[in-house]
Image: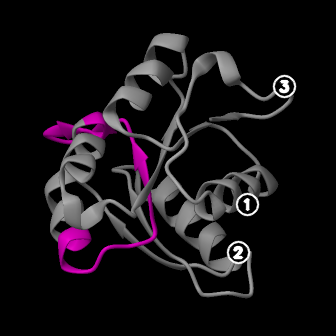
Amino acid sequence: MTDKKQWRALVVDDEPVFTARLTIALKTLGFLADAAIDCQTAIRRILQDPPDVVCVSLNLPRDSGYHLCELIRRSPALHRVKIVVISDRHSPEVIAYAEEAGANAFLKRPFKRELLAECMVTVLEEPRAPQVEASQQIPGTAFALG
């Protein structure tokens, strides 16, 4: 990724196989990566030791990825944490709602490792939180960034 520092990521998803694959992919990209299976576990970990980026699914048990995004954005202590929503639901309305909830990027499932790497670099090297807009889909890619 970058020579400056080792980035830290938290994957929040309740699908064990996908979570393991994404965590491994992030580690191969040079991240220190960990995982949580629900919103409550994730917010505890994020508050204890904020990662650089949270990769969150929209469908979580007992809560939603949208809610986790909102919790992160409401906390002044977490203003530097970047959020990448990862979902197989990607209608313009879903992407717009993720933006409203505070996502920095939206990665459509399925995706290739190269696209994950591009998304992470773009999000983490952005000096401020970019806004995600469905109308700003990058042709030929599966993520939207501001």
Q: Secondary structure at mark 1?
A: helix
Most foreground residue, 74 or 51: 74
Identify the disc placed on residue 139. 3
Q: Are marks 1 and 2 in contact (CB under 8 Å)?
A: yes
Q: Is residue 17 left or right of residue 56?
A: right
Q: Residue at x 50, y 66 (%)?
A: 20
The quarter of the rendered structure image containing the C terminus is top right
Q: Residue at x 76, y 55 (%)?
A: 118
First in sequence: mark 3 vs mark 1: 1
The span picked out in magenta is 45-66
Q: Are marks 3 and 1 in contact (CB under 8 Å)?
A: no
Task: Indicate the amino acid at tag 3.
Answer: Pro
Where's residue 62, x and y in %?
A: 13, 40
Where's residue 113, x and y in %?
A: 75, 57
Q: Residue at x 70, y 78 (%)?
A: 28
Residue furthest to the right:
140
Q: Residues within 10 Å of mark 3 (few under 14, many from 20)?
A: few
First in sequence: mark 1 vs mark 2: 2
To which quarter of the image does residue 136 belong? top right
Task: Indicate the amino acid at tag 1.
Answer: Ala
Q: Secondary structure at mark 3?
A: loop
